[in-house]
Image (cartoon, rainbow, N blue to C red):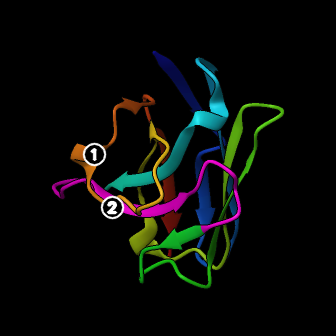
Amino acid sequence: QVQLVESGGGSVQAGGSLRLSCAASGRTFSNYNMAWFRQAPGKEREFVATISWTGLARNYADSVKGRFTISRDNAKNLVYLQMNSLKAEDTAIYYCAAKDRSPTWSFSVALYDYWGQGTQVTVSS
């Protein structure tokens, strides 16, 4: 079992920045690929970014590419999402997720085994 706890959400004006953190506990953190998803009101949960267990490879949704950066610190069991140039359409609950490490990318909600409780991000225009 892996327990995930997100933090760092809040309210910001368009063009601003936020950094989300996700603290993991339980099994060995470096055994997991990590990802961020988000869910806006009335919409399905969608993929935002993912990072390999080594931290050397990353992948992003087209909607956030160039604005968001995912990173991890395996020594501290933390994964981050740096969000810059925020837009109103980035408003959502952001979730941290983990799955067993794999050399292939996983963008589907169904492929992740562990989830945090989410943190709200609100961007006002």
Residue 33 picture location, percent across and down: 52, 46
Residue shown at the point (42%, 83%) measured from the top left: 62
Tell whether position 52 is magenta. yes
Q: Where residue 38 appears, x then y in whole percent?
A: 38, 54
Say above or below: 124 vs 5.
below
Q: Tag 1: Cα neighbours inside 10 Å, few (<14), some, or many (≥20)?
A: few
Can you tell which mark lies on residue 86? Answer: none
Give the residues drawn in magenta, as a range.
40-57
Q: Is residue 47 left or right of residue 36?
A: left
User: Is residue 57 toward the left or the right of residue 32 in the image?
Assistant: right
Q: Secondary structure at mark 2?
A: loop
**Whether residue 50 is situated above or below residue 15 in the rendered picture:** above
Horizontally, residue 82 falls left or right of residue 104, namely right
Residue at the extreme right of the image, as rendered: 75
As for residue 102 lying within the magenta part, the answer is no
Residue at screen point 59% across, 68% down: 58
Kind of residue sitting beneath label 1? Leu
Number of residue marks: 2
Which secondary structure, mark 1? helix
What is the chief secondary structure element of the magenta stretch? loop
Separation of marks 1 and 2 at Cα, in angstroms: 8 Å
In the foreground, 97 or 102:
102
- Find disc 1 in the rendering and name its residue: 111
* Observer-nearest of 80 and 72: 72
Residue that label 2 marks = 107
CB of mark 1 within 8 Å of CB of mark 2? yes
**Residue 80: x, y in percent?**
68, 50
Q: Residue at x 18, y 58 (%)?
A: 43
The residue depicted at 58 percent of the width and 35 percent of the height is 31
In front of the other: 76 or 41 = 76
- Percent across and percent down for residue 125 are 50, 76
**Within-10-Å neighbours for mark 2: few <14, some 14–19, many 20+:** some
